[in-house]
């Protein structure tokens, strides 16, 4: 059975993973919306934090994984690494968008503005723009191998922007609050921290499920594109 034939059938364990992710998402929403106490300073708005921070962490993870597969593609030249890089880059873009929307929703009632060109927010907007650029580049190149190489370089550039984004809240003390959870210590109350960690793990599980499913579909698309190129090449040879 070839690679495309294997990808055509969704394995049962992938369906089970999806059901598990959806079930745990419901539990996480209950914990965040019902069980979590209101924060002394932020009141009920603390509930938005569980989704906003979880989306941001998963976005960072997806950027890292996309860059790793991009490096593997540049090294080994295997098409499946490009397919996986695209799947994770798409999810990085999705979670970057959710991070921005969540941040704006959180920002208006707490900081009295939806958006400001604060360093952290600006770097997040830049991250989103770079991810959009990744797909613009892919759309401009027809040759599969060249498209994979060029977009892999863009994915590595996106990765290079990540440390600045991660540290921006510490380096530039502006409107965005400093991190309350990092290797240097935890300033968040345990009751909030437990629910945040649970929701972050669930977001990671949803990300994993979507990445595996998107990779399966990507392998199908790559197989179809390869067959189309072979048919086109055969017709051109006959015409000559």
Image (cartoon, rainbow, N blue to C red):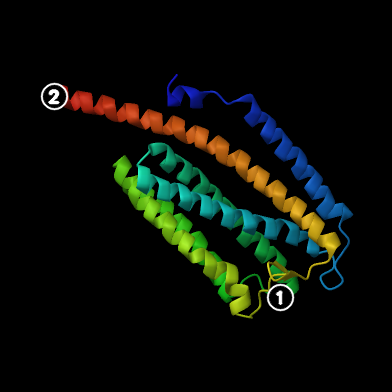
Label ID, residue 184: none
**Residue on which the image places disc 2:** 239
Given this view, does label 1 or label 2 mark the residue nearer the observer?
A: 2
Q: Position of residue 14 (x, y in %)?
A: 63, 31
Q: Tag 2's secondary structure?
A: helix
Instruction: First in sequence, mark 1 or 2: give its number.
Output: 1
The residue that appears at 57% across and 57% down in the rendered structure is: 60
Judge whether 189 appears above or below 93 on screen: below
Name the residue furthest top. 1
Q: Position of residue 66 (x, y in %)?
A: 49, 50
- Residue at x 79%, y 49% (from the top left corner): 29
**96 sits left or right of 41 in the view:** left
Q: Which structural element holds mark 1?
A: loop
Residues at marks 1 and 2, CA–CA distance in whole angstroms? 67 Å
Residue 171 lies left or right of residue 194; in this view the side is left
Q: To which quarter of the image does residue 197 belong?
A: bottom right
Q: Residues within 10 Å of mark 2 (few under 14, many from 20)?
A: few
> Residue 160: horizontal and vertical position, in percent?
46, 64
Q: Tell whether 138 sits left or right of 92.
A: left
Q: What residue is shown at x 62% (from left), y 74% (from top)? A: 169
Q: Residues within 10 Å of mark 1 (few under 14, many from 20)?
A: few
Which quadrant would residue 108 be assigned to in this image?
bottom right
Q: Which residue is mark 1?
A: 112
Residue for point 79% across, 48% down: 28
Q: How many callouts does the rendering have? A: 2
Q: Nearer the viewer, residue 5 or 137?
A: 5
């Amino acid at each position: 059975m070839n690679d495309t034939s294997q990808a055509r059938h969704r394995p049962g364990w992938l369906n089970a993973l999806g059901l598990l992710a959806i079930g745990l998402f419901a539990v996480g929403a209950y914990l965040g919306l019902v069980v979590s106490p209101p924060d002394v300073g932020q009141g009920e708005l603390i509930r938005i934090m569980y989704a906003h921070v979880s989306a941001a962490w998963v976005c960072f993870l997806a950027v890292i994984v996309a860059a790793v597969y991009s490096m593997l593609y540049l090294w080994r030249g295997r098409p499946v690494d490009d397919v996986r890089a695209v799947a994770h880059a798409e999810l990085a873009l999705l979670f970057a968008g959710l991070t921005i929307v969540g941040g704006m929703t959180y920002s208006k009632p707490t900081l009295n503005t939806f958006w400001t060109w604060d360093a952290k927010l600006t770097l997040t907007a830049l991250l989103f723009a770079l991810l959009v650029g990744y797909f613009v580049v892919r759309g401009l190149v027809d040759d599969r191998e060249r498209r994979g190489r060029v977009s892999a370089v863009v994915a590595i550039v996106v990765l290079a922007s990540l440390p600045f984004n991660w540290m921006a809240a510490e380096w530039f003390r502006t409107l965005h609050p400093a991190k309350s959870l990092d290797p240097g210590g935890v300033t968040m109350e345990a009751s909030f921290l437990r629910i945040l960690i649970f929701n972050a793990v669930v977001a990671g599980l949803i990300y994993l499920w979507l990445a595996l499913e998107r990779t399966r579909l990507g392998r199908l698309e790559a197989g179809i594109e390869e067959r189309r190129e072979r048919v086109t090449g055969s017709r051109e040879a006959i015409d000559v």
